[in-house]
Image (cartoon, helix red, strand yellow):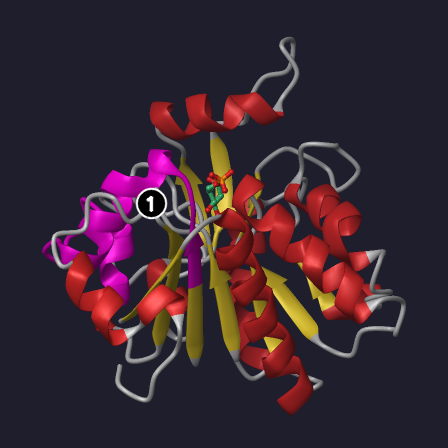
Amino acid sequence: MKILIFPDVATASAETARRILATLAAQPCAVLGLATGGTMKPVYEALRTALGQSPATFTSFNLDEYVGLPSTHPQSYAYYMKTQLFDAVALPSAQAHLPRGDAPDPAAEATRYEAAIAAAGGIDLQLLGLGANGHIGFNEPTSSLASRTRIKTLTHKTVTDNARYFGPDEVVPRLAITMGIGTILDSRAILLLATGAGKRDAVARMIEGSISAACPATALQLHANVTVLIDEAAAANLKLRDYYETVHPGGADEIYT
Ligand code: GLP
């Protein structure tokens, strides 16, 4: 894993966006794996500014979607992506993929989605956030490290964490369709962005803990091309922080990984 520690959220997010843009510059028709959540909003803001109404030539597959929410629901991840990125960069809808939350048969939808990723040639660059409990996508603790796209029941912690995005009278869905950990590990390169003190325990476990389904993000230790971008608050519990900062001072990328 390449661990890049930045002084603050703004610099960590800007570098994440810069790396996505560099991928698109080298490979305009790249297949991107995209993530949602509050952490990604500054990244998408930077992409909107840089890409404008081009229209976009990439193809994207989002990690996950709530079961039961149609794409028009303001808390659906489809709606998030439409408003945070897709409309602004004029991404043709045929190139923008998310699991359908309102599919009549969610299990069949998960199987279809996994096949669609394979049919597109797999994911060139996967963007990941990190749940405070160590989840990636919606792969909650005890998810199989070999799992593929499927339905997952959300933990009480995740439902509580994500309730802040829902209105007081809205019910947070308890089920999601998510790429599996095996699906994520098939990506050719991975960027994980985590910021803020609320992620410091999960960041430390992901990077320095034993590989275990108890912390799904530890599976990323098995991938040969993962870059973790964090701010100082999220880095606070890392035991080997001095080492990472020696290798990559201020988040600078060196030839040594
Ligand atoms: C959700 C998403 C994850 C995301 C996580 C963190 O659970 N399924 O993909 O990484 O939230 O979200 P936030 O960035 O809002 O902390």
- Quadrant in the picture for the C terminus: bottom left
- Quadrant in the picture for the N terminus: bottom left
Q: Is 146 situated above or below 65?
A: below
Q: Position of residue 163 (x, y in %)?
A: 53, 22
Q: Residue at x 32, y 89 (%)?
A: 255
Inspect this view and state whether residue 59 appears: yes
Query: Is 73 placed left or right of 152 in the picture?
Result: right
Query: Is 82 placed left or right of 174 in the picture?
Result: right
Residue found at the very far top of the displayed protein: 169
Mark 1, residues whose alpha carbon is within 10 Å: few (<14), some, or many (≥20)?
Answer: many
User: Which three-letter amino acid code belongs to the residue tagged 1?
Assistant: Ala
Residue tagged 1: 234
Total numbered labels placed on residues in the image:
1
The quadrant where residue 30 appears: bottom right
Q: Position of residue 80 (x, y in %)?
A: 70, 43
Q: Position of residue 228 (x, y in %)?
A: 36, 63
Say which of 160 and 233 sits in front. Answer: 233
- Does the residue tagged 1 have its C-beta within 8 Å of any atom of ligand 1? no
The answer to if 194 sits in the magenta stretch is yes
Q: Residue at x 40, y 33 (%)?
A: 154
Q: Residue at x 62, y 56 (%)?
A: 43
Q: Position of residue 108 (x, y in %)?
A: 55, 54
Inspect this view and state whether residue 185 appears: no
Q: Residue at x 79, y 70 (%)?
A: 51
Q: Is 117 situated above or below 158?
A: below
Q: Write down the region rendered in magenta.
A: 192-220
Q: Secondary structure at mark 1?
A: loop
Say which of 132 and 68 sits in front. Answer: 132
The answer to if 46 sits in the magenta stretch is no
Say which of 100 and 228 sits in front. Answer: 228
